[in-house]
Amino acid sequence: MMAFLKLLARNRLALAGLIVIGAVVFLALITPLLPLADPDVTDTPNRFLPPFSEGALLGTDHLGRDLLSRLLWGTRLSLAMGLAAAVIAATIGSAIGIIAGYYGGRTDNLIMRGVDMLMAFPYILLALAIVAALGPGLMNALIAVAAVNVPFFARNIRGITVGIAHKEFVDAARLAGMRDREIILSEVLPNVLPVIVIAMSTTVGWMILETAGLSFLGLGSQPPQADLGSMLGEARSALITNPHTSIVPGAMILVIVMGINLLGDGVRDALDPRLKSGALSRPMPATTVERTGPVPAANTDSLLDIATLRTEFRVRDRLYKAVGGVDLHVEKGECLGIIGESGSGKSVTALSVMGLVASPPGVITGGAVHFDGDDIIGAPYEVLRSLRGRRVAYIFQDPLATLHPLYKVGDQLIEAIQSHESVSKHDARARAIDLLRSVRIPNVDSRIDSYPYEMSGGMRQRVGIAMALANDPDVIIADEPTTALDVTVQAQILSVLSDLRRERGLAIIFITHDFGVVGQLCDRVAVMYAGQIVEEGPTEAVLHSPQHPYTSRLIDCVPTLGGGQRKLAAIPGLPPVVDRLPAGCAFAERCDKAQDTCRVSGIELFATGAARKTRCLFPEIEQERRA
Amino acid sequence: MTGYIIKRLLSAIPVLLGISVIVFLIMAMIPGDPATAILGSYATPENVEKLNRDLGLDQGLVPRYFIWLGNMLQGDFGRSFALNRPVLDEVLDRFGATLILAGTSFVLCSLLGIAAGVISAARQYGVADKAITFVVLLGISIPSFFLGMMMILIFAVQLKWFPVSGMWPIYGDRSLWVLMDHLTMPAIALAVVATGVIARLARSAMLEVLRQDFIRTARAKGVHERRVIWRHALRAAMVSIIPILGIQAGFVLSGAVYIEIVFQWPGVGRMLVDAILKRDILLVQGGVVFIAACYVMFNIMVDVAQALLDPRIKT
Ligand code: SF4
């Protein structure tokens, strides 16, 4: 509660709303105590006095009545009407909602049908019909507004109640022999009450506006008694000659409703966990770059060279160092595997290359990515855009989520082509068909007009691959492309990829957590742990003689074909949270060989052979397990 | 698609019946003898007897409802005694004006609201976003009738840009241009609140969509950011925006009552308020049923639009 209030106070607009509403309510409460003129005493000789006149601070209206006094009394009445309507609507609506939700079945069905019918009306029509039947008047307007808002409460509260009605404590109460009415009052009601109160506070502004509206139309409060709406309604005929009589009550309604809205928004924001976590912020077109140190030179003159790349996530006051200085490179036509558990930073590394890490919260804070000789970290958006898909393409994990659900796959392919080349739609379509053929999709002519949801997972991933191939890129970065697929489909996709690589001389960076896949496809492999590379080398060599204890554990996780189910040496423990990395070796907590020296300071990645590197003080070099 | 439309149209029948029952029940709450209430000052014994016979008012509620429903299905909505003409004629005469006003407003608020929401989301926390957020807050807080009055004061009386009120000048020609001149202010005043609501929801729908994986895919393809926002993200966000448009259409139709009063627009809303004040009960009853039915039909159109947009719905 305190945290909530603090959050509310931090939201300056909500605070302003609270103060405004507080002030208005306070004024309305003390109105009878103030030395005001009688709001209903007419004084025709002094009609239409302008504001700041002697004895009438806001002037007088068409009957010479004191506007300030009428304003305050009118505000009092409007607030009371709005609040009363809200309370009535909330009470009746919630009762209906609780009964429907609690009993369920036919009762629920019948009630909710009725509620739906009521909601089929434009709301004011219903209110007008009720006022027409009962006759104009303050109470009748109140009833009408309350009635019109009943369905809103009924519907919301029913939803909540349905969730509660099946909780254990309700079942327990039922078993204990409590009657339904007791259960509703003692178990259900206390749980839905907060929701009712919140729903009420968000609608009270509406109710004030609606009751004022009916009064404005002459259907609510009747003269001489006035609320803000009827004051405005009466002043309308003198709008042009004496606008102040209209502006005074109108501005008051505006202030009240605005105050309530500000407060309501503040409350909503304060309650929304997504705002707190930044999950509702818009990712920028390219990852933010804030490099502090000098830009490192490329380590090699390969096609793609990543040098001491650092990417972190800034969520509120916490810092997650997802990638902590990674060096990698891939040659033309080579396949590099990056392997690691989820959260090891492998995907973030890959996405950083083309600035695709969602930002906020992602920020690239250091390092360089040289593509074809040029550093592209922090390159202008247009440069990055023209590289994306054309020279460096991506294949993502779950094609149901990564393909646009509302466009036909063919159109998505055509778009990929047309983003980089000005070709006619017709030619692009012909190329799209060829692409789909090249990833071995059957019945291409009909498939091209399918939507992603109409395809199987394997087919969708082929589309994903075809899309990556659309502009004949030099590098394809495949981020766990087969993880969501079953084993046979996985094998097919891998063979498509490996054929394409051979035919087109593609460089592939293949990200996975599965050593079996790496063994089939990759020339070299880099193992990542907690944002760093812990071992790197030719696939064969690493597979047969892993040097880092973490690598050997990962390899032990792979079930071998034909060898029966080897005991899955699931690695005990979890990878460290990357906002609290230990001082020394990040793997120390889970490592069998860990010594005190391991925990002292960061460990270098050092060469352990011709093409091999390991980040471990006690690498397993001596116990080679050559076959 | 045709199958879907037919299905939706059929499902409207129970809703329409429900609406007629609700209106009937509300009207049955009128205290006192119904015939006398309907006729008001026209209530001579002969008139009362004739009305009782025509509408079955001396019978029980159920037969009364079916007589009323049967009459309506034959196009007979009763007779307005204050205006001395059939209710349906009067409603149809007025409906055109309301349709022009509410329709224009609806188009305005949809286009402006969506555009503002998209820009706001695309520039989240930027100057444009803050400005839009503030204007939107003002827009959804100001009562439309007060806004209309202030617009008259500023743009008609002070600046003389637009006529003060009405749909047509008393004398002079009735060209489209003249209509636009009269329509501008009421249409804007009516659209403001809905624009604000739509802008807000469009903004949050866009923010929701912009974090999804297929947006990253579009960027990874090298699609230009402008296209990512206005095509990929907006298309997906429309799935949640369109139902909001349907709801807002109801609010626009409702708000038209106030705006028609403020701007003396000769529409159904003003007719209803006049009828209530004159206790012209059959006119109110007929008008309410008619507008509610139109709204139901409009919502079917919204559903169809939704199905056209989202291929996953069809079937
Ligand atoms: S450095 Fe020490 S703790 Fe880390 S992996 Fe090597 S042996 Fe284990």
Image (cartoon, coloured by chain):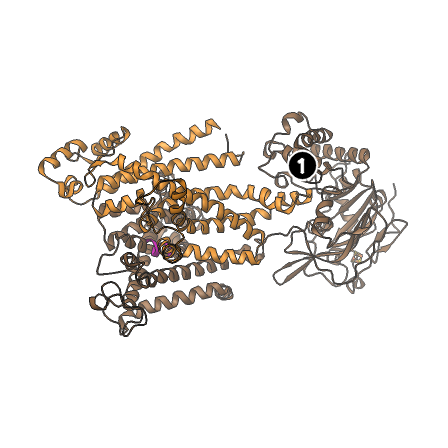
Chain colours: A brown, B orange
Residue drawn at point x = 47 percent, y = 48 percent: B198
Disc 1 designates what residue?
Answer: A485
Expressed as whole percent of the image width and height from the top left, the position of residue B24 reads: 25, 38
Q: In which quarter of the image is ligand 1?
A: bottom right
Q: Where is residue A135 in the image (x, y as percent from the top left)?
A: 22, 49
Residue B25 at least partly seen: no
Q: Which of B28 and A611 is in front in this view?
A: B28
| Relative height, residue A515 to residue A528 (above, below) | above
Subunit bearing disc 1: A
Asked if the stretch drawn in magenta spans residue A203, the answer is no
Q: Give the range drawn in magenta.
A: A205-210
Check disc 1 and report its element: helix, strand or loop.
Answer: loop
Residue A206 within the magenta-colored segment of the rendering: yes
Q: In which quarter of the image is the C terminus of chain A?
A: top right
Image height of B63 relative to A64, above or below: above
Q: Most prominent secondary structure in the magenta stretch? A: helix
- The percent position of residue A618, horizontal first and vertical second, equals 84, 57
**Going by the picture, which residue comes out furthest to the front?**
B172
* Count of residue discs: 1
Residue in front for this viewpoint, A624 or A225? A225
> x%, y% of residue B114?
51, 47
Please name whichever residue, B93 or A602, is drawn nearer the observer in this view of the structure: B93
Q: Which amino acid does label 1 sit on?
A: Leu
> Left of B242 or right of it: where is B100?
left
Q: In this view, which residue lies farthest toward the right?
A: A610
Q: In which quarter of the image is residue A562?
A: top right
On the picture, is A505 further left or further right than B90? right
